[in-house]
Amino acid sequence: MINWSVILGIAKTHLITKMKSTVTATLGVTFGIGAYITLVSFMTGLNGMLDDLVLNQTPHIHMYNEIRPSKTQPISRYQEFQDAMNFVHSIKPKQNQEKIHNALPILGYLKKHPNVKGATPQLRAQIFYLSGSIELGGNLVGVDIMEETRLSNIQDNIVEGSAEALKNSNNGILLGAGLADKMSLSIGDRVQISTVAGDIFPLKIVGIYQSGIAEIDNVQSFANLNTVQRILGESENYVTDINIKLLNIGESESMARNLEKQFKIKAVDINEANAQFETGSNIRNLITYAVSITLLIVAGFGIYNILNMLIYEKMKDIAILKATGFSGNDVQYIFMAQAILIGILGGLLGLLIGFGLSHLIDNTPFETDALPTITTYPVNYNGTYYFIGIAFALISTFVAGYLPSNRAKKIDPVKIIRGT
């Protein structure tokens, strides 16, 4: 029968009498776990922010008319060339309109779909921005601004003005921040836009839009869908794009393929649209976890070395314990108890230090023009990381204590007492 009160009492006495070694071993666990929590919380928070920056501006499915060469070329229509190898150069794209045919019925169908959170129409127009002698090329996107606000983070990217101001203005525009800076314009000013056909329309700036991606902010602005339709001289069913947000993003790829077949238009799912970004995000996460695991492993080796030395210094105590009737297993339990106590104390302190440093980082000001909605450094307080931290502290100290204590239980007390 194991007398745990005696074993824990002896383990506690050993830890107190060798306070320097105990503190060193505990701090090894503490800083290893604390560094792991801080690093993984900050890095995953940063990766999450970068993911949201791109993915929140990307629809789960984007539908549009793709301009591409005709599958059947004129030469293929001649019977005499069917069995020959034909070399055709400069194949011209099939002549078709950019608009989506039957856009309004398609939108009605999508809004009734059980997996669709929302579907918004868009009209993209190539234009020129005119302000005095300045003429900049770009595009104007006609949107249902309140529906876009509901389905995306566009409201967070309006640094001046509001979505409601655009909704209530028949000739308003949310001007890209890069364009506003280049043309020295602000809310209340007017900017003239020129279509490809040469028609010029004045629009009032009711807001400034900043996505954080310079390539977008330097060319893109938003207006009401009916405003852009009026500028282009098109009817209210003229739509070039449909953006879809799903309730289950995992079905985006299969649903995009089905929509392509059903409506004979191009449908791009979010994974296809962001394939390169997804690869970069996975690599960043892989590096984060690799560095974090390395920190834990290094801390584990430090714990092992300290406990190994602690047992070496306690050789005479081990001999005395065995001589007074303690079995080899009892001796092993004593040193295992020391290791577990160090793991618990060091692990809890590590979690507190990690949380404290994460909270400090989370409250550190971080201001940049590229990310107007971010005011402090991003931190991810996922409880899984804290569970992994304390679990590793216990496992590593258990292993680090088991190996040397297993050797200690096999020690012959007679040899130690004799000094051999």
Image: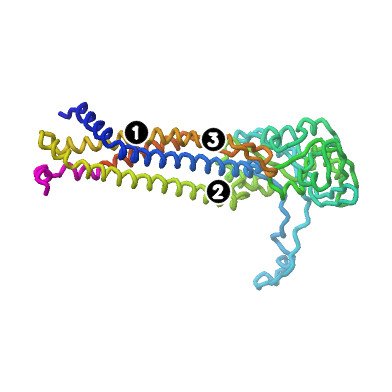
Report how many numbered discs are placed on residues in the image.
3
What type is the residue that disc 1 sits on?
Ile
Q: In which quadrant will I find the N terminus?
A: top left
Front of the two marks 2 and 3: 3
Q: Secondary structure at mark 1?
A: helix
The one nearer the camera, 149 or 313, is 313
Residue tagged by mark 2?
A: 281
The one nearer the camera, 176 or 151, is 176
Q: Position of residue 67 (x, y in %)?
A: 73, 55
N-terminal of the pair, mark 1 or mark 3, is 1
Residue in the image at 68% along x and 48% along y: 264
Numbered tag placed on residue 22 in the rendering:
none
Q: Position of residue 73 (x, y in %)?
A: 72, 64
What type is the residue that disc 3 sits on?
Leu
Q: Which stretch did the figure color magenta? A: 402-420
Q: Residues within 10 Å of mark 3 (few under 14, many from 20)?
A: few
Q: Residues within 10 Å of mark 2 (few under 14, many from 20)?
A: some
Residue in the image at 34% along x and 33% along y: 344
Alpha carbon separation for disc pair 2 and 1? 34 Å
Q: Position of residue 212 (x, y in %)?
A: 68, 44
- Position of residue 81 in the picture relative to residue 404 (left or right): right
Q: Secondary structure at mark 3?
A: helix
N-terminal of the pair, mark 2 or mark 3, is 2
Alpha carbon separation for disc pair 1 and 3? 24 Å
Mark 2 touches mark 1? (CB < 8 Å): no
Mark 2 touches mark 3? (CB < 8 Å): no
Residue tagged by mark 1?
A: 344
Residue tagged by mark 3?
A: 360
Q: Specify the quadrant of the image occupied by residue 248.
A: top right
What type is the residue that disc 2 sits on?
Ser
